[in-house]
Image (cartoon, rainbow, N blue to C red):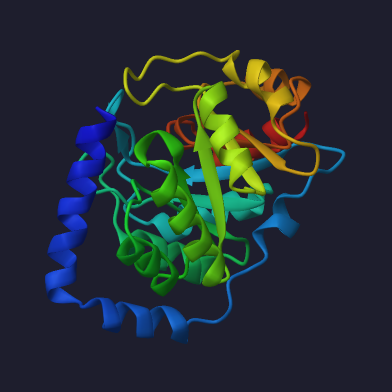
Amino acid sequence: MLADLVAGALEDAAARQTERSSSAVEAAALARPAALDSLAFLAPADRVKIIAEVKRASPSRGALAEIADPASLAAQYAEGGASAISVLTEQRRFKGSLADLEAVRAAVSVPVLRKDFIATEYQVLEARAAGADLVLLIVAALDQPTLVRLHEFVLSLGMTPLVETHDAAEVSRAVDIGASLIGVNARDLTTFELDPDLFGRLAGRIPAGTVKVAESAVKTVADVAHYRAAGADVVLVGEALVTGENPVTTLKEFLSV
């Protein structure tokens, strides 16, 4: 599944590149105001922080929410206290777009994450050109030289990489490149099975001073509390917010942990 998702994302990026050259995207990226200091927004505090996600669909669950106005949803997330907004830009399985990211960037003053299957510099430039402050790098999708290269490239553009891991070996790879923001995804992207206890087993391998993000398997306040007790500084929440009745209320409940 992960290989298919990456291949599809690369095909779509290549198609966009025929319409908009690397030099044009680079010029747009460099013309953007400086990216926000995402680590300052997500730094460890005396309460958990939330990255709230704009997510229409997923391979595991299918359609989740129409989200006709992603900017409005993001504004609600910010009102509810989210420290950053994640925007799915993958179009085939998640029904997202870079236009969603641009709309969200214009609507909020907190950092915005491009969540996609990033494997090339062109995709990183697209993220910055659309206004992203953070870029997701999935360790399982990248060999180590590519991970190192993209990590450095994201930093060179003033953005922050969120380096996502799924097992102990991947955490070690993220630590080896000096990642300041490391996520542990409870969902195995090769099987899409969930393991809510995975973060707790891996958190001790992440060095002090690194911001630790727990991803997936969040439906209730108890789930957020579970991650917080296991050492999460930040919890990324998607489905619970887009499928719930009131994202502002849900966020405030989660942030009470």
Q: Quadrant of residue 12?
A: bottom left
Q: Point out residue 183 in the picture as x, y percentages from the top left corner.
A: 58, 36
Q: Quadrant of residue 46?
A: top right
Q: Is residue 84 visible?
A: yes
Q: Point out residue 238 in the picture as x, y percentages from the top left corner.
A: 48, 36
Q: Is residue 88 or residue 211 the one in the foreground?
A: 211
Q: Point out residue 184 in the picture as x, y percentages from the top left corner.
A: 56, 30
| Relative height, residue 212 to residue 167 (above, below) | below
Q: Quadrant of residue 56?
A: top left
Q: Viewed as shown, does residue 17 lie left or right of 157?
A: left
Q: Is residue 87 or residue 125 the one in the foreground?
A: 125
Q: Which residue is most to the right?
A: 46
Residue at the image point whose x is 51% and y is 30% from the top = 170
| Relative height, residue 74 to residue 154 (above, below) | above
Q: Viewed as shown, does residue 148 lie left or right of 256?
A: left
Quadrant of the snapshot with the C terminus: top right
Q: Point out residue 214 in the picture as x, y percentages from the top left corner.
A: 61, 31
Q: Viewed as shown, does residue 98 lie left or right of 240?
A: left
Residue at the image point whose x is 71% and y is 43% from the top = 211
Q: Is residue 87 or residue 219 the one in the foreground?
A: 87
Q: Is residue 143 or residue 247 the one in the foreground?
A: 143
| Relative height, residue 240 to residue 135 (above, below) | above
Q: Is residue 237 visible?
A: no
Quadrant of the snapshot with the N terminus: top left
Residue at the image point whose x is 45% and y is 47% from the top = 137
| Relative height, residue 66 to residue 36 (above, below) | above
Residue at the image point whose x is 78% and y is 32% from the top = 256
